């Protein structure tokens, strides 16, 4: 007898190639419009699905999981970060969670370097001059930034993305330092030419640029709080392509306005789309709308990972990218 096909519900529009492949392979319900599901729609989705494919804009919290149907058995997240999913509660309810690690590493690391360069070389200010038609020609003193070669880069979180940033930063001639829960193996440290700091505070105080590349967890919430931000050099720059909650955004805004930190490049925000309006007014702050991993190639590879996770689960095995709490 043919096996009953599992029902897959996808919460957001995905690139066309991914949606086409999902439709060919699974009994899938795709989203019609390009907006996040409302809470009511999410509740319906977890009641009807065997497998849910959410994204970081869906809050898969204990309340929602409490309303899930008996049949929900896998949450195959389209994305690497799972801070929007209560993985522990899912586990208690016998629901597996998987994600899409690895395929957005290089794109996010590229964007980290782009932000470092945008802030230190004042690229948005130059762009604004051209867009306004204000350029009066080359001048020896115009828009002088700082050279990144030789500067000390402190990487906060040395997982896949942190390491990819380290490789790129070395190629730009930066000196790479890092802080991580666990120290890397000596051969990896050697390959990356990276110096480990056990003390985050001491590392922060000595860096020219800090990049946040750790995930958002209860223990990284406001890791860069007001006290630590104050340890930064006044000439220091901070960049975040990870999750907004790691930095106390209000404290950062205050300190940049007061000239205690030289600049920031942010792709993610503490309160999602509710970006502190004062940040938007600062010329030495470069803000992007969470596009660190936004390449077509990356998005398609994320879809391929989701498909492999679902197929493996359908075949009765644990998904290769299972996330454990
Ligand atoms: C992720 O997958 O968690 C990324 O933040 C998306 O850009």
Image (tube, rainbow, N blue to C red):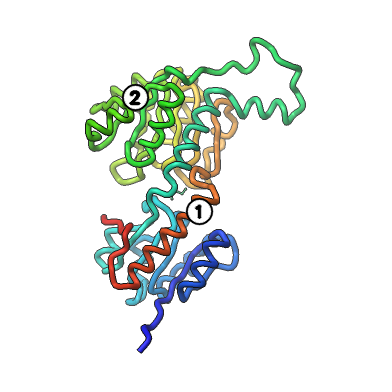
Residue 307 image offset from top left, x and y in percent: 42, 64
Q: Is residue 129 left or right of residue 225?
A: right
Specify the quadrant of the image occupied by residue 228: top left
Identify the mark nearer the N-term, 2 or 1: 2
Q: Nearer the viewer, residue 268 or 121?
A: 121
Q: Which mark is residue 299?
A: 1
Q: Is residue 244 visible?
A: no
Q: Is residue 20 visible?
A: yes
Q: Residues within 10 Å of mark 1 (few under 14, many from 20)?
A: many
Q: Nearer the viewer, residue 19 or 135?
A: 19
Q: Nearer the viewer, residue 188 or 227?
A: 188
Q: Nearer the viewer, residue 244 or 309?
A: 309
Q: Secondary structure at mark 1?
A: helix
Residue under label 2: 204
Above or below 295: residue 166: above
Specify the quadrant of the image occupied by residue 230: top left
Q: CA distance from mark 2 to mark 1?
A: 33 Å
């Amino acid at each position: 007898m043919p096996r009953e096909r599992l029902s897959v519900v996808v919460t957001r529009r995905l690139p066309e190639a991914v949606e086409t492949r999902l439709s060919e392979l699974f009994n899938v319900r795709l989203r019609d419009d390009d907006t996040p599901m409302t809470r009511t729609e999410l509740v319906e989705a977890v009641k009807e699905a065997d497998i849910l494919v959410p994204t970081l804009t869906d809050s898969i919290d204990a309340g929602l999981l409490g309303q899930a149907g008996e049949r929900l058995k896998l949450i195959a997240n389209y994305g690497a970060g799972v801070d929007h999913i209560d993985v522990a509660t899912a586990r208690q309810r016998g629901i597996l969670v998987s994600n899409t690690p690895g395929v957005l590493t290089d794109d996010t690391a590229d964007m980290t370097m782009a932000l470092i360069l945008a802030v230190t070389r004042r690229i948005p200010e130059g762009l604004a001059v051209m867009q306004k038609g204000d350029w009066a020609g080359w001048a020896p003193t115009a828009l002088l930034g700082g050279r990144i070669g030789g500067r000390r880069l402190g990487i906060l979180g040395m997982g896949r993305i942190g390491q990819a940033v380290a490789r790129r930063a070395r190629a730009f001639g930066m000196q790479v330092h890092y802080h991580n829960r666990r120290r890397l193996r000596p051969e990896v440290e050697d390959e990356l030419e990276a110096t480990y700091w056990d003390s985050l505070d001491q590392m922060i105080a000595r860096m020219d640029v800090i990049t946040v590349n750790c995930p958002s967890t209860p223990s990284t919430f406001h890791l860069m709080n007001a006290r630590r931000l104050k340890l930064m050099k006044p000439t220091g720059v901070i960049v975040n392509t990870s999750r907004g909650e790691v930095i106390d955004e209000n404290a950062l805004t205050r300190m940049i306005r007061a000239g205690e930190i030289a600049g920031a490049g942010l792709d993610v925000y503490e309160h999602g789309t509710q970006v502190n309006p004062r940040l938007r007014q600062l010329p030495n702050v470069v803000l992007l709308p969470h596009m660190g991993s936004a390449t077509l190639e990356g998005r398609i590879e994320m879809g391929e990972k989701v498909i492999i996770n679902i197929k493996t689960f359908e075949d009765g095995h644990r998904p290769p990218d299972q996330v454990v709490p």
